[in-house]
Amino acid sequence: MATVKFVQYGLGPIGCGIARHVISLPGYKIVGALDIDPQKVGRDVGEVLGLGRKLNLPVSSDPSVIKRSKAQLVLHATGSRLVSVRRQLFAAINAGCSVVSTCEELVYPSARNPRLAREIDRLARRKGVAVLGVGVNPGFVMDALPLFLTSVCKQVRKIEAKRIVDASKRRLPLQRKVGAGLSVEEFYSKVRAKELGHVGLLESARMVADGLGWKLENLSETIEPVVAEEKVETQFLAVEKGMVAGIKQVAKGTKAGEEVLTLELQMYVGAKDPHDSVLIDGEPPVDAVIRGGIHGDSATVAIVANSIPRVLASKPGLVTVRDLPIVAFAGNLQGRCRANK
Amino acid sequence: MATVKFVQYGLGPIGCGIARHVISLPGYKIVGALDIDPQKVGRDVGEVLGLGRKLNLPVSSDPSVIKRSKAQLVLHATGSRLVSVRRQLFAAINAGCSVVSTCEELVYPSARNPRLAREIDRLARRKGVAVLGVGVNPGFVMDALPLFLTSVCKQVRKIEAKRIVDASKRRLPLQRKVGAGLSVEEFYSKVRAKELGHVGLLESARMVADGLGWKLENLSETIEPVVAEEKVETQFLAVEKGMVAGIKQVAKGTKAGEEVLTLELQMYVGAKDPHDSVLIDGEPPVDAVIRGGIHGDSATVAIVANSIPRVLASKPGLVTVRDLPIVAFAGNLQGRCRANK
């Protein structure tokens, strides 16, 4: 099987993690890397990734690198909002590349950006490439996993998914993103400025509802602070008692006047019992728990890499995790691609 | 969307459950039913299914009913062994029907019957239909679910799946199938006669190994009795202390000299902590539990019904749950089929 040439678009912690992991897999070759950070542009990719060896490939800030590199795949990890990354995606698609992206809104883009989703779909079909947004959340814990679990149900009345993350075990940007260390007032002012909070609950909720054929009358989202009940210290920061330890964000969907879908995300430093859970009120009921929860950063890197064979084998267009065959660990790219035949 | 006409092949407890459920869904019409039981042949299907109304459709023992009924789908639930149901499957495929079957060996037929699997695949392709074997086990708990969970792993070193079922909550044939009430000697003699035990561990193990690109050097299966430590009574039978309460069946796969795959099924009356679990030693690790376990009978009915839209939208041939897009609850057939486009 020919080597898959890819460009890494975005060299933040997740982007670097993806590139490092995919480079380590047989059958892949990195042929370009893009970032806008002046601290990175021009430096050797191997150095920026911390590989301990040069790749003789400079980090570029110019998306035309994608076309010139003759890549067939772009691994994209730059932003959560589709409008802010749309040009990057267009550049990749126009260069004839399939795309796997961590952009949260791209995981189910019809939720918030239906017109843009159609535009991406049309362009991808025209260029004969597939585009997928994926991650651990959205993309797995609160959407693909609950949907997958409903496959054993004759009836589904209600679904409740929870993800409780101890942010103290995660990187500093994530601790900041959940507001750890802020006062309650600062927290709410940052929420209003959209500088805080998780993007993806609405995407997950829409994917689940559409997957089950549910027409929700109402879908609402709330965000509030989790206040520290005692002082918490992490590797990076300290949160005094009474200050914000993190967020509690909840999406609720109703159908026929009843709340049928609840997605609850708590991410805060010092969370006592981190776990992911899916509770299906159905026939039969399903009460699933992932003890300790799935580690977000490394799981996102994994699911991006594991999705690649499915995306490369997919029909062209904008696809979601709901459209693809079961994505499994794909350490062996060759094996996976054969299996797709 | 046009109505999907189907034939129910096999009217045992599971087959009747499937037919009753699918009849209750919008978009389906039963146009034939097959069984060999003289107690059922000739009677009205509505009566045999306990619908409380006639369907003006007699149960037949003649497979030519499939062709005459102009069905496009056969729901098949007659036996666990592929060799014993092959003619039934051929009849369905030759009549131009796609098939969803509970035949355990059909869930991953290349495990034990590679030649027959190829034969079915060729015939299905020629007839332009898809054939799927599915169920809760094999088909979900010990294969599709573990594979699905590995999608968040960068590395997978070892997988351990367990299913602990309290057989006292299940139907009598299942209590018999696990040997409840036998002496230990009778148990082993029935094992030797292949009258006891679960069919499917090898199928699950092969599906997981192939899905991960693992070449197992060795795959072995053991079966032993679980002996009652105290008297257990069920709705149907009583097991004295020292007699067999059920089975413990374990499949183990090794790779590079290490045990990397363990599938353990315990089904016995009086099991204390019924649950399904999947433990992935990987990066990140995944420790998933379905508390109480998934109820086998109704879940099998559900997953057969929920798979139908995916099978009807599939490319022709023999397919496995590994090849299909995520199967979810499909109460709304129309919605699901549109989503497949």
Image (spheres, coloured by chain):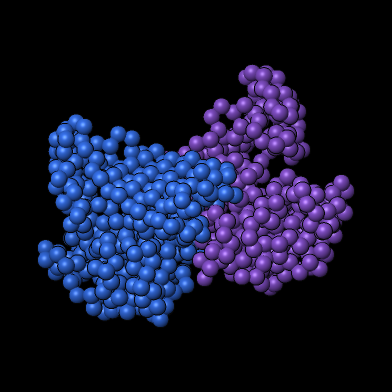
Chain colours: A purple, B blue
Q: Where is residue B325 in the image (x, y as percent from the top left)?
A: 50, 61
Residue farthest to the left, as pictured: B39
Quadrant of residue A4 within the rendered picture: bottom right
Residue farthest to the bottom, as pictured: B126
Seen in the picture, residue B168 relative to B205 is either above or below; the reply is above
Q: Where is residue B19 in the image (x, y as percent from the top left)?
A: 28, 61
Would you say residue B179 is visible in this rendering?
A: yes
Would you say residue A285 is visible in this rendering?
A: no
Q: Which of B146 and B102 is in front in this view?
A: B146
Q: How many labels does the image show?
A: 0
Image-based side of A7 in relation to A205, left or right: right
Seen in the picture, residue A114 relative to B127 is either above or below; the reply is above
Identify the residue at horizontal 85%, vertical 60% (top origin). A62
Q: Nearer the viewer, residue A2 or A269?
A: A2
Identify the residue at horizontal 46%, vertical 48% (top origin). B258
Quadrant occupied by the N terminus of chain B:
bottom left
Image-based side of B314 in relation to B275, left or right: right
Q: Position of residue A340 (x, y in %)?
A: 52, 67
Q: Nearer the viewer, residue B159 or B1?
A: B159
Identify the residue at horizontal 55%, vertical 52% (top origin). B151
Q: Position of residue A243 (x, y in %)?
A: 70, 22
Identify the residue at horizontal 34%, vertical 64% (top origin). B112
